[in-house]
Amino acid sequence: MWTFLKIIRLNRATVRSLNPLPRGWTVVLRRSCSSASSESRVTNPSILRHLTSKITATGAITVAEYMREVLTNPVSGYYVKNDMLGADGDFITSPEISQIFGELVGIWCVSEWVASGKPKVLQLVELGPGRGSLIGDILRVFHQLQSVLHGAEVSVHLVEVSPKLSQLQAQCLAGEYTCGGEDELVYRTGTTHTGLPIYWYRSVKDVPRGFSIFLAHEFFDALPIHKFQRTEKGWREVMVDIHPEEPDKLRFVLFPTPTLASTTLIHEDEKRQHLEISPEGGVIVQKLASQIAEDGGAALIADYGHDGTKMDTFRGFRGHKLHDVLEAPGTADLTADVDFSYLRRMAGDAVVCMGPITQRAFLKNMGIDARLQVLLRSCHDATTRAQLIHGCDMLTSPEKMGSRFQFFSLLAPSRLTQPWEEGEGLGRRRRGPAPLPVAGFSELGL
Ligand code: SAH
């Protein structure tokens, strides 16, 4: 996850209400929902014990299994037990830095819905919503653009594995909510502060079919990866084993023979020497692609990543510092850069992929500079003005988050093709206007 010590803090104590603002844009007071800090998680011995007994019983485990246990084990997983975001946590993300980020993504959603012919049903689906800040900012935009969305049946669907974070999301987003049973696919339902139905799921496969805009911000980097190395004998998988001299320590080993993953996941044209692949990420992208192809919609995936060039990016973060991935498992975030070339391959031909382009390019194309000016015009408090400017700089500066973070999109092919009238060959004529450009991926004429 991105970490930056000098984060700006827009919190209820320091930000004043700036109403009234032109065009309904307000500065948001946020970060009200917080919980356990990293201070209170010095060690998590139960995960280490669980891992060492598992390895003793069945042998070395894959890096993917290690990540899955450490991050999402239902009893003691890092995501399951912690609120790791923000200044007191382990990392900070773009929606937590500035409200403008979510507002621009909200405009992107509305713009794609309009360009898709304003379908009656609009499902807004977010994977891994964290504290709910991104979706909260988007819902504010939806509320302010009610006249544009008029007539659409909008519903909100959150895919969240963490009971702790989903509770925070419910507190922040929903006026009222009820919890379902442990085994129910929809484990919480409610109504947002703006009156929209909102649902929580553990898996994206449980989200209902229908025209959907899918959002995934810093979600794919949290999914388990397999690691491989090219050897003289072919590809071999990196595994996690118990250190032979120190039974309380873990170490990486290379499996001596091919594994199921090394024989099935690696593309025959692969040129790299080391490789990280997240089949779970691939399956999720396939699900998004098939739903978009059949029901219409779009997906916007934003994360740090590369287009099939990087090799060793698996790392840990604790308290905004790099942390050894095998040290004190469960007390630090584990993450790997997203390989967008792999996601593109898994998405297949049924959808059109756009990007990856840098966060800077996306936000500039979406008009971040104009949005900042609108907010600044109504803001006379020097501290808040400085925070707004600093936040935008963090998001767009190439040395900060502007270059490392990438935006990638899946679109229904019909979104980019111009409808044709019936007829053959030269007799065919264009029907209707040319498709609208995809916001963010090309300049938006504001
Ligand atoms: N999108 C947020 C949070 C990013 S942290 C932001 O940018 O601020 C990753 C989020 O994904 C957390 O909410 C975590 O609980 C969730 N998550 C991680 N693995 C998941 C999985 N396998 N299924 C569903 N949610 C998951």
Image (cartoon, grey):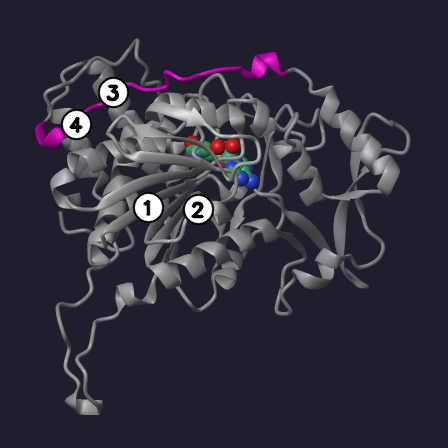
Residue at left 55%, top 54%?
Answer: 283
Q: Are marks 1 and 3 in contact (CB under 8 Å)?
A: no
Residue lying furthest top:
13
Q: Amino acid at mark 1?
A: Gln
Name which of mark 4 and mark 3 comes first in the sequence. Answer: 4
**Residue 409 on image: x %, y %:** 37, 54
The numbered mark at residue 386 is 3
Residue at left 32%, top 55%?
Answer: 297
Is 64 situated above or below 36?
A: below
Residue at left 87%, top 27%?
Answer: 246
Disc 4 and disc 1: Cα gap in Å? Answer: 29 Å
**Residue 77 on image: x %, y %:** 63, 28
Q: Which residue is disc 2 drawn over?
A: 207
Q: Which residue is disc 1 drawn over?
A: 123
**Residue 182 on image: x %, y %:** 57, 31
Name which of mark 4 and mark 1 comes first in the sequence. Answer: 1
Tell me which segment is drawn in magenta.
Answer: 22-41
Is 53 situated above or below 30?
A: below
Eye-nearest disc, 1 or 3: 1
Q: Are marks 1 and 2 in contact (CB under 8 Å)?
A: yes
Name which of mark 1 and mark 2 comes first in the sequence. Answer: 1
**Residue 123 on image: x %, y %:** 32, 46
Eye-nearest disc, 2 or 4: 2
Q: Amino acid at mark 4?
A: Leu
Disc 4 and disc 3: Cα gap in Å? Answer: 12 Å
Q: Is residue 158 left or right of residue 421?
A: right
Mark 4 neighbour density, 10 Å: few (under 14) some (14–19) many (20 or more): many
Q: Can the viewer see residue 110?
A: yes
